Amino acid sequence: MRIAVLSGKGGTGKTLVSVNLACAAEKAVYVDCDVEEPNGHLFLKPEITEKQSVTVTVPEMDMSKCTGCRKCVDFCKYNALALLKDKLMIFYEVCHSCGGCILFCPAKALSKKQREIGTIEAGLSDSVTVLTGCLNTGEVSGVPIIKGLMEKLPEQDTIVIDCPPGSACIVMESIREADYCVLVAEPTLFGSHNLAMVYDLVKLFNKPFGVVLNKCLPGDNPSEKFCKENKIAILAEIPYDEKLGTLNSKGLVAVRVSEQYREMFCKLLSKVAKEVL
Amino acid sequence: MKLIVPVESKSLDIPVCPSFGRTPLYMSFDTETGNHEFLDNSAATSQGGAGIKAAQMLVDHGAKAVITYRCGDNAAQVLNAAKIEMYKAQDGSVSGNIEKFKSGKLSLLSEIHPGFHNHGGAKE
């Protein structure tokens, strides 16, 4: 069972829900796809067993073979190449790794080179396998890291995918393999707008989904209203709870230290499991 | 030598276009003959890398200097590598800027911004 946890903005509680869902399962894999700022490891504190580099294929030039035909420059839709009299300039952060320039070069002056854009760490936190994607500072796209993470997912087990915030390409890549999507939402007007964004996304991807309302207080909850208007299942309501906030601030996993939250997340997990079946 | 100024339309009486990479046209002025011509900027509508493509076009055109308000990092790298000098545009008309260039009153462009890269730089 592959559960993706997403939200339209940062700070709604994706990591809280993901980490606790993974720890509520008997055996689980927690995948941190928020590669720009992965933080699940701060709670799970895994013992790192493996670290691998994630690379993208980019062109490399041998100027001694270049005839100056400019086929590579003209082909590149992203304008990642510029040819001067005596050198080809390659703008790696603009390159989309399509490989077209290499294919089109009649003089075979261009060849493939691997360029590191980030890393994937694997580790263990009790019964939870932790996979963390980390994009190097200054890199433009974390999508290749998400793809690398997805290749490492086992067939069985409960897999919880902690998505990046928003609804852009990198989130699409993160939910592609999911059987079910959990949308986490805050009880504000802004929160309901962000919920609407990811709601549109999961519908577009035809994924079964439900909502977890986080930081719930007495009174109006625009996100709850949005769910009712659109007939969206509310899977759980997490209270705006000082105790939970304190646990979080200490980097503790609520499920591991609080019976109340263990119960809540076990319930949530079994609810999702039923939905997937 | 060929002097380049980004312009919004085919006139010398208008201000210098604030965008380098996504300007619709370049005015190319020949300092020896005093003639000028306008070049379409095919990079203006690029999804990305407009500055690189525009700079490449000016390199191919044989430009030796550019008068511009600003220039992104990638474009500046190409212009620098091709030894094309960048001068800071001043308010006033294109022809006024050319006169100032001729009398040595324009200073070199010192600030290179990191580029807008699809984040709203085109029509500021």
Image: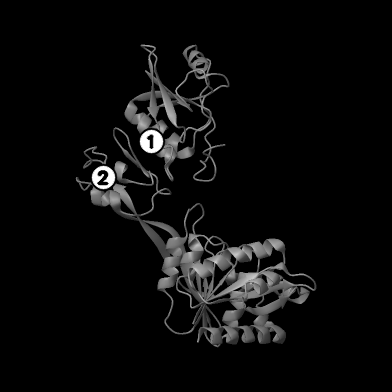
Q: Is residue A23 above or below residue A87?
A: below
Amino acid type at circle 2 is Asp
Residue A276 relative to residue A214: left or right: left
Residue B93 located left or right of residue B61: right
Seen in the picture, residue B58 relative to A264 is either above or below; the reply is above
Q: CA distance from mark 1 to mark 2?
A: 28 Å
* In this rendering, the label closer to the viewer, 1 or 2: 1
Q: Going by the image, does A74 lie left or right of A130?
A: left
Q: Quadrant of the image for the N terminus of chain B?
A: top left
Question: Of residues A79 and B78, which is closer to you in this image?
Answer: A79
Question: Same chain for the residues at labels 1 and 2, yes or no?
Answer: no
Give amino acid for label 1.
Answer: Ser
Q: Secondary structure at mark 1?
A: loop
Residue A227 visible (yes or no): yes
Name the residue rendered at 49%, 57% in the picture: A136
Identified at 38% across, 36% down, the residue is: B42
Please, is residue B35 above or below residue A79 in the view? above
Q: Position of residue A31 (x, y in %)?
A: 51, 73
Residue B106 tag number:
none
Which residue was labeled with disc 2? Answer: A62
A179 or A53, which is in the foreground? A179
Residue at the farthest right position: A218
